[in-house]
Amino acid sequence: MPVIVQKYGGSSVADLEKIRAIAKKVCRCKAAGNDIVVVVSAMGKTTNELIALAKQLTNTPSRRELDMLLTTGERITSALLSIAIHAEGHRAVSLTGSQCGIITNDRHSNARIIEVRPVRVEDELHRGNIVIVAGFQGVSYKKEITTLGRGGTDTTAVALAAALNANQCEIYSDVDGVYSADPKEVSEAKHLPEITYEEMQEMAVAGAKVLNADAVEFAKKSGIAIYARASFHPGKETVIRRDTPTEDHGVRAVVSEKNVAVVGLVGKTVTDCTLNILNAVDETITPIKELRFQCPEEHPTWARGSFVVSTATLPDWDRAKQALRDAGRQELDIEEGLAALSLIGLGINRDTSNVRQAILAMEEIGAPILALSTSRFRISLILRENDLERAQEYLHRKFVAKQNRIPPCVET
């Protein structure tokens, strides 16, 4: 029978009524002649509540113990959904990430999947069971329970779909797919029926919460299409898949991220100080992006560098910040209260028109750009957080709502 992997986010399984509704939906899919693997998140805000409990004891809880604590949320959901499916007259079995053969590295709170051995899952499917998997978790090669970071349940689902050679992977949440901006923040946000792997990855890296970047990478490598849908409102959907190499979408989406810090290293320092900072990043497991370091050949003892940290995803930013300051030997500057605003699209930087228009747009509304970076599919601006809301609306109106494009610069 064809294998379908479905993932349900926390809002979809927030209470017993919703879990019963999901159980009925899964049973209908099974009755239609499919083998079903369902990956679930913790119920509602359970993960946040568990973190809050830990922080009542200490502001810097051990990441290992946090992993032990947080993985209980998904296990509760998987067991309850399995019980609900049994009540509907179908057979189901709930499994943890480790029981599913999800092997990770040993980085607590932000582990990466290095291998999937789905033998137990295949055995249960062969027995006719619906398999319910606790998402967001795995086991390291050291036999430690690990979590996969924000959006890790998406990664669990797509990694399992790839390992099982599934026909498709369906990601269900409280929104009916991917939009050109967060519809809760931008009134003119447009639904995107299709989007490429690359664009979706850039959106995820830039802060979009619809899908996890690692999940999209697994889909891209295996060629599995991802269907992003609403759990309880069928109709629209977004399909994430490969695109034709000649298609140019321009700017498809505007993505924002709050709680951003920029860490800058300035002044005279030795190269090993730069290495000390990178070691501190590693030791505190601080995910960073937009990394830049310069050590001019004519001044080998002088360095300038910076990187961006998404502090909202860190359970112990205060500890990481102090470790970075210690490593920087007073040469480190950490600026908080910032936000990232990104334009995403295939072919977005084939010329300079989009960058120029973004810079001019920020000048028009008086929102200073503190940093700017580009990639093949993205233009990212660092702004003050209090400028974010109006900047996001304005850029979306300029680039997406009206699909305005400035013609390429012509040298005269």
Image: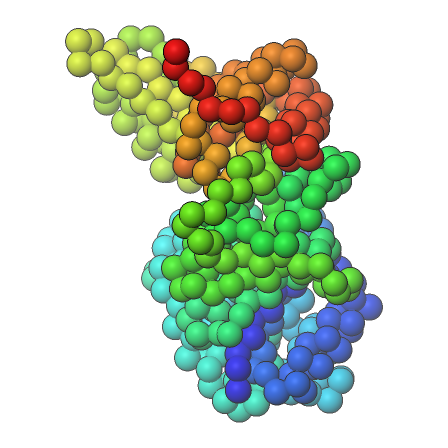
**Nearer to me, 138 or 130:** 130
Return the x and y of residue 340 as percentages of the image width and height. 56, 28
Residue 398 location, quadrant: top right
Furthest residue in direction bottom, as rendered: 127
| Numbered marks: total | 0
Residue at (57, 90) in percent of width and height: 128
Q: Is residue 378 above or below residue 25?
A: above
Left or right of residue 386, residue 148 in this image: left
Left or right of residue 39, residue 176 in this image: right
**Nearer to me, 345 or 321:** 345
Residue 17 location, quadrant: bottom right
Left or right of residue 224, residue 292 in this image: left
Residue 285 visible in the snapshot: yes
Residue at (48, 34) in percent of width and height: 348
Q: Is residue 205 above or below residue 99?
A: above
Residue at (68, 77) in percent of width and height: 26
**Nearer to me, 297 or 14:** 297
Return the x and y of residue 22 as percentages of the image width and height. 73, 71
Return the x and y of residue 292 as percentages of the image width and height. 35, 25
Residue at (45, 19) in percent of width and height: 409
Q: Considering the image in quadrants, where does the C terminus appear? A: top left
- Identify the image's colour scheme: rainbow, by chain, secondary structure or one colour: rainbow
